[in-house]
């Protein structure tokens, strides 16, 4: 029953999410944290962080992490399958129709509207993640610096993530020891 729940829950997330891994965060909050209580918001943020550093699609990586946590290897297979099933089916349908419809103004307008909605969802997700992830002033400063370095200067995100890991470790090491 757990395996079916994993597949169907992530199928629902995949079906109702447009725009990729970050835009699925609100759906994960509702389905995986709120409804199923399979993990916490902090854990999902950790999965997102690791997913950013691993090859592949973030949505699939996060689903695999949660699936493994709940159902070991079968869960790590079924949860990502649930996430990608709607996209695969939709892309097959769209690919057959779209190659004949891309020049239609109504279709172009619909895609323009979807892009705007996805931008809004991504912005809301990023704001939410920043609120949850930055508890100290240096974390907020590091977040802003990483954004500037990637968005404005075009730095490779891999190097920015590695640099943030090193700075985060340095910040942890410089913290005063707790008294016991």
Image (cartoon, rainbow, N blue to C red):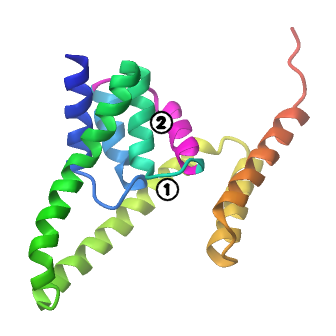
Give the percent coordinates (x, y) of residue 64. Answer: 41, 35
Which secondary structure class fits the magenta region best?
A: helix
**Mark closest to the chain's N terminus, 1 or 2:** 2
Q: Is residue 38 left or right of residue 53?
A: left
Position above or below: 29 against 150? above
| Pick the front one: 17 or 133 | 17
Secondary structure beneath label 1: helix
Quadrant of residue 6 in the image?
top left
**Foreground of the two, 94 or 43:** 94
Q: Which residue is mark 1?
A: 126
Write the residue at 36% across / 38% down. Answer: 29
Q: Quadrant of the N terminus?
A: top left
Farthest residue, direction top: 180
- Count of residue discs: 2
Q: Position of residue 19 (x, y in %)?
A: 34, 61
- Label 2 neighbourhood size at 10 Å, few (<14), some (14-19), many (20+)? many
Check disc 1: other Cα within 10 Å, few if <14, some if 14-19, many if 20+.
some
Residue range highlighted in magenta: 36-52
Residue 44's mark?
2
102 displayed left or right of 67: left
Where residue 156 appears, as percent x and y from the top left, is 67, 67
- Say which quarter of the image contains residue 5: top left
Within the image, what quadrant is residue 11 found in? top left
Please say if the residues under marks 1 and 2 sit with CB atoms less than 8 Å apart.
Answer: no
Q: CA distance from mark 1 to mark 2?
A: 13 Å
Residue drawn at point x = 39 percent, y = 47 percent: 59
Q: Residue at x 17, y 78 (%)?
A: 110
Residue 88 picture location, percent across and down: 22, 55
Q: From the viewer's perspective, is the residue at label 1 or at label 2 nearer?
A: 2
């Amino acid at each position: 029953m757990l395996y079916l729940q994993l597949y169907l829950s992530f199928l629902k997330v995949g079906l109702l999410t447009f725009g990729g891994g970050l835009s699925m965060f609100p759906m994960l909050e509702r389905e995986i944290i709120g409804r199923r209580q399979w993990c916490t918001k902090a854990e999902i943020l950790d999965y997102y962080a690791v997913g950013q550093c691993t090859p592949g699609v973030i949505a699939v990586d996060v689903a695999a992490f949660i699936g493994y946590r709940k159902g070991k290897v079968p869960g790590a297979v079924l949860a990502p399958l649930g996430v990608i099933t709607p996209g695969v089916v939709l892309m097959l349908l769209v690919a057959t129709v779209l190659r004949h419809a891309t020049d239609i103004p109504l279709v172009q307008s619909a895609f323009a509207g979807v892009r705007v909605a996805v931008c809004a969802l991504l912005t809301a997700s990023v704001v939410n993640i920043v609120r949850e992830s930055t508890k100290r002033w240096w974390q907020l400063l590091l977040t802003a610096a990483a954004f500037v370095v990637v968005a404005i200067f075009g730095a490779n995100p891999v190097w920015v993530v590695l640099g943030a890991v090193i700075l985060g470790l340095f910040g942890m090491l410089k913290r005063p020891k707790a008294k016991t």
